[in-house]
Amino acid sequence: MLKVFVDAAAGWNRQVKPRQGGRSAWWRGGAAFILLVTALTGCIPSSDAPPGPNRAADLANLELSEGALSPAFGPDELNYTVSVGSNTASITITPTLADARATVKINNQSATSGQPFGPINLELGTNPPITILVDGPGISKTYTIVVTRAPNADLEKLELSAGVLEPAFDPNKTTYEVKTGFTTPDTMVTAAVADDTSSLTINGTAVNSGQPFGPITLSVGSSNLILIRVTAANGVTKDYQVTVLRTGTTNLATLSASATAIAFNANTFTYNVSTGFTTDQTTITATPVDDTASVTVNLQGPVLGGGTYGPFPLALGPNTFTIVVTSPTVASKTYTVTITRQPPSTNANLSNLTVNPPGGTVTGFNPGNLGPYTVTVASDQTSVTVAGFLEDQKARLTINNVPANSGQGISVTLASPAPSSTPVNVTVVSESGNVQTYGLIINRAAPASSNANLLSLAVSPGQLQPDFSPGTTNYNASVASDVIGIIFTAAPQDGGATMTISLNNGSPSQLAAGQNFIVQPLQVGNNSVRIRVTAPAGNTKDYITTVNRATPPSTNALLQTLTVNPPSSSNLIAAGVFTYNVTVPFSVTSTTITAVPQVNPGATVTFIYQSSTQTGSPFQVTGLVEGLNTVTVRVTAPAGNTQDYTVRITRETASGNNNLSNLVVSAGTLNPNNVPFNPSITSYTVSVPNTTASTTVTASLQEPTTATMTLSVNNGTPSNLQHNVPSSSIALAVGDTKLDIVVRAQNGTLKTYTVTVTRAAALSSNNNLSALSVSAGTLNPNNVPFNPSITSYTVSVPNTTASTTVTASLQEPTTATMTLSVNNGTPSNLQHNVPSSSIALAVGDTKLDIVVRAQNGTLKTYTVTVTRNP
């Protein structure tokens, strides 16, 4: 027995398994290795071997590119652990052999002593053991290293939508500051983890890595703390902190004064405005943009968020207000408002003076001239409206002692009866008390004549109906159709009256007394001529004459509609087209033309066809010949001119198409199998089994609208056959049945398609054998001559006969078939009068079944039992 000496350091365990070639198991803690010991030629196979361990499979050193071995390396220390940081994605291992004869493999791949091996990729967490196998002369040793890569709790990205991180982002720096302006009310935070297995929260809310989070509201000041926490897969956390400083602003949002308007702009800091003498105090309202800012106005304040300050007294002249806005985060700003209170005005002038009616500025008005001014109005004017316009809006105004605003009209009643004069006083008192009174005299004129009657009225050509009378205002006159103008002559009773004349409510023209005035152009039909007389008093009177210009006869000789039915009742008329072509089928021998003129009633329609003429619509066109038939439609306008329309009717020639487009039978398939159908093939055959006792024929015409067809069976009486409709059932006798489909074209030509259907005779029921034999032994009974009614046989063969064949012959070899099964096994086909394949015979009985199937499917089984003697 081979003895092995192993120096085992303290703490190692050993188990030796007898009769396994010296195999021992060594382990320390949870790691184990197998020591294989093989006797070498020349080794001492006894306990006389020299003492001490075999170091041929030792490592002299073991180094890693990252991390430290635990425990420290020793040649007899076989199991190690190493911890590396999360950023270490791979390591290399450098093994150094103690014996130059040894070889080393790392993870079953050859390595070189003293040279780095790798890189070996590392996953996060604990990785599978790395094995280092050292093979020395007569001994092997395996070292293992388990590397744990720490999970990563770093960020690889951190950005804010507001401002820039200070300092710039570094995964190893965890504290940052961002400064942003007041106008940034919130921010979005985008953070991405360096390790996909880590999780992320922002201000306590779970966030997907790389996805924007927010918005996060930013208050003014440095109290905006954003905490980003990364939790690694092993539970280790790392916090990143961003402090966002949203600086304040010392701009004002609003600035106003109760004493006067201020055109405020946040970036304008100095204002100069004025107010009137009567305004002796003011308040100042100031609101900052930033509600954390404070406002002080002329030492009132500071008030957080601003407000209304005052009231402040206003002295005559400039009054200065200083508005100071302060903020805890930015420099203060000062706005200055100077309000100048004006002294009282001495201006007591009017800028304008109006009287309505007549309307507008008083003639000759001058602010420095107090008048009096004279205005004349009509005799029927009983009141006027007087308005004064102040040069200085701070002055006060009265009209005939009635207070009024600048530009406000005050009604003044005029003295009666006309003619008369009415005085008006317009008084202005300035802000300082100066007084000026403007004088007006309104003269009401004497009444004017109101006579608006005509003295005379005449027309030429034509005659007024009724005769003229001053009290009659409506007249009629008639002129021929070729008259385009008519002369009117008129004179008023009052020589101071004026006249205008207009045609069909058009623009009026002045008409002098006794003037011959041509009114034109006259439209066909009624024309309204208006003579308006205006009396000196302004009242008017209208004399209206309706002039009727006769209508000329129409020259319109065009058609409104034209139809030819058949083929259609649709209107053929197209503008500017006078010849129309229509086509009717051969079966149509007459048609109807209907024509309606555009001038209806009035125009007449005449039809000219062959030797016949007819006035009046509709017109029956009969005796249409094959080919072209021409009809002239003549329209005569009321004026006597004519227009001819030509209708060309083409009657189609008779079709000679006697072709089928398809032909099928319900039983069997046409031969030839004509797909796609060829109408030139007219003879077909069909074979059907004996069980098919009838069939139908379906034929389709190429010209189903003009052609017809009949069906005759075995040259019998023809019957009509409909297009694409199956015929009645046709009985089939055994043998041939002849079917003739005769197609008649529209022009009478015929074509015959013939289908011969052959029905097969009845199926044979013969399932008898005519002979049966085996190659080994003799059938019992020995059936000679063969009797097919005997179906059971036995055969006895000696033990030396290990196989046999079967030969069977059929009475109906052309229609019947056979199968052979051995001991009820799977049947195999058996050919007529042909020996079967060799059949192995076991000692004892072998059952052979020959099953015969007749043409009609009936079965008969012949059984041969072969007994092989022991």
Image (cartoon, helix red, strand yellow):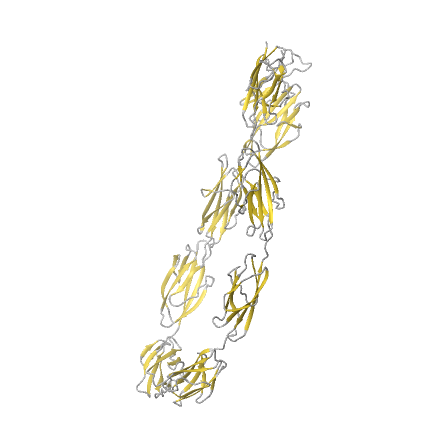
> Could you tell me how many numbered marks the image carries?
0
Residue 626 seen from this side:
yes
Q: Position of residue 241 (x, y in %)?
A: 48, 44
The residue located at (46%, 46%) in the rendering is 225
Residue 576 seen from this side:
no
Up/down of 712 relative to 145, above or below = below
Query: Who is closer to the viewer here, 613 or 807?
Result: 613
Q: Position of residue 26 (x, y in %)?
A: 57, 19
Q: Position of residue 270 (x, y in %)?
A: 45, 65
The residue located at (57%, 44%) in the rendering is 741
Q: Quadrant of residue 404?
A: bottom left
Q: Position of residue 410 (x, y in %)?
A: 34, 78
Q: Is residue 393 left or right of residue 71?
A: left
Q: Is residue 396 left or right of residue 121?
A: left
Up/down of 772 relative to 748, above or below = above
Query: Who is closer to the viewer here, 844 or 468?
Result: 844
Q: Quadrant of the C terminus?
A: top right
Up/down of 175 relative to 498, above or below = above
Residue located farthest toward the top when viewing the structure as drawn: 870
Up/down of 347 relative to 468, above or below = above
Q: Quadrant of residue 428?
A: bottom left
Residue located farthest toward the left when viewing the structure as drawn: 416
